[in-house]
């Protein structure tokens, strides 16, 4: 399912009498802010400025409430927010959502590092790479600007790193989790949702509406479609066919499929344009025939084997 994950909320306390019963103080600052934590399964960070009558909350809501983000339904998120509202004696559904993550976990056929290596860039801009220092495999990629961030990472490795064995065993029984399978998490992290969604502000009760969640789903899919992927070419299985002649052509043909141009025709015209002083007519025909034989070793796929657009479209919001 598609769901929310990390979120930052701001709420005016106003006439509400904020309860500090479940808040554990961790710091006081000269600017008037005090820091606290609320202990759930994971901690939620809270800041309060009593003179300004403001409260800020930061947490990965899924981890805070249930200790994992393998699944996190809308109903469970509402339950978490309602319980926290009751503890603090304020209505968090009226809080402004200052930033949030929206995405989903998808099971993939490839090993996660192979899958990630074949996602190259977002709108022509390269990804930053996450790499675990203990081994060489890539664990994730991201692209970010001032307004939002894209994250694509090994969800199985992340789950093993962040959760207890008992939680994973429970997920095997209730949610179909299988430690032997490969999982990728793809999400949009809205750093400034008010700008991205062209609203002055977004409130929790508004974001939880079906139409807005569908808008987030559509935006996630459109973001994914803007990622350049390899896998549009069938790689020859015979090692002899993967020579210095075919390897550049494989890359060129794949780029041609992505950007909509015909590399075969471009190369043919380029050879024709070479001066007769360098290559005569016989030389050109020989080169063209050599290139033609290399093209025969390369076949196209209708769709990248690494493309998970269909899986994203089938994901429900529950």
Image (cartoon, rainbow, N blue to C red):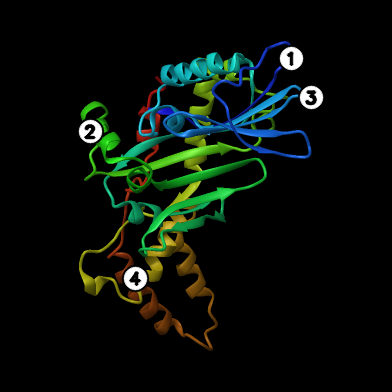
Residue with the mark numbered 2: 172
Q: Residue 51 — which label?
A: 3
Q: Are marks 3 and 2 in contact (CB under 8 Å)?
A: no
Q: Secondary structure at mark 1?
A: loop
Q: Residue 246 — which label?
A: 4
Q: Secondary structure at mark 3?
A: loop
Mark 2 vs mark 4, CA separation in Å: 45 Å
- Indicate which disc, 4 or 1, sits on the residue closer to the N terminus: 1
**Residue 118 seen by the camera:** no
**Up-down: is 269 above or below 118?**
below
Q: Please report the residue visible at 35 percent of the width from the left and 75 percent of the height from the top.
A: 245
Residue 46 horizontal side relative to residue 267, left or right: right
Residue with the mark numbered 1: 14
Residue 200, by quadrant, is top right
Residue 106 horizontal side relative to residue 56, left or right: left
Eye-nearest disc, 1 or 2:
1
- Indicate which disc, 1 or 2, sits on the residue closer to the N terminus: 1
Eye-nearest disc, 1 or 3:
3
Mark 3 vs mark 4, CA separation in Å: 69 Å
């Amino acid at each position: 399912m598609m769901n929310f994950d990390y979120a930052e909320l701001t709420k005016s306390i106003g006439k509400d009498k904020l309860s500090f019963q479940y808040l554990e103080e961790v710091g006081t600052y000269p600017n008037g802010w005090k820091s606290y934590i609320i202990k759930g399964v994971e901690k939620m960070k809270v800041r309060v400025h009593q003179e300004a009558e403001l409260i800020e909350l930061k947490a990965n809501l899924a981890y805070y409430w249930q200790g994992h983000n393998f699944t996190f339904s809308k109903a469970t998120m509402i339950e978490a927010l309602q319980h926290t509202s009751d503890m603090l004696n304020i209505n968090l559904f009226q809080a402004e959502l200052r930033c949030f993550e929206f995405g989903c976990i998808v099971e993939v056929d490839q090993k996660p590092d192979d899958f990630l290596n074949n996602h190259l860039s977002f709108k022509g801009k390269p990804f930053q790479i996450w790499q675990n220092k203990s081994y060489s495999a890539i664990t994730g990629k991201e692209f970010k600007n001032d307004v939002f961030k894209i994250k694509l990472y090994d969800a199985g490795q992340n789950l093993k790193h962040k959760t207890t064995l008992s939680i994973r065993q429970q997920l095997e029984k209730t949610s179909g989790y299988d430690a032997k399978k490969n999982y990728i998490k793809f999400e949009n992290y809205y750093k400034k949702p008010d700008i991205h969604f062209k609203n002055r502000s977004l409130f929790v009760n508004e974001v939880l509406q079906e139409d807005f969640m569908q808008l987030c789903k559509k935006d996630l899919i459109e973001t994914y479609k803007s990622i350049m992927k390899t896998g549009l070419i069938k790689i020859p299985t015979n090692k002899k066919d993967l020579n210095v002649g075919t390897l550049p052509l494989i890359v060129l043909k794949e780029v041609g499929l992505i950007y909509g141009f015909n590399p075969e025709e471009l190369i043919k015209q380029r050879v024709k344009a070479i001066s007769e002083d360098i290559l005569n007519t016989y030389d050109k025909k020989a080169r063209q025939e050599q290139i033609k034989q290399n093209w025969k070793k390369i076949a196209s796929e209708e769709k990248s084997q690494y493309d998970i657009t269909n899986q994203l479209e089938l994901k429900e919001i529950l």
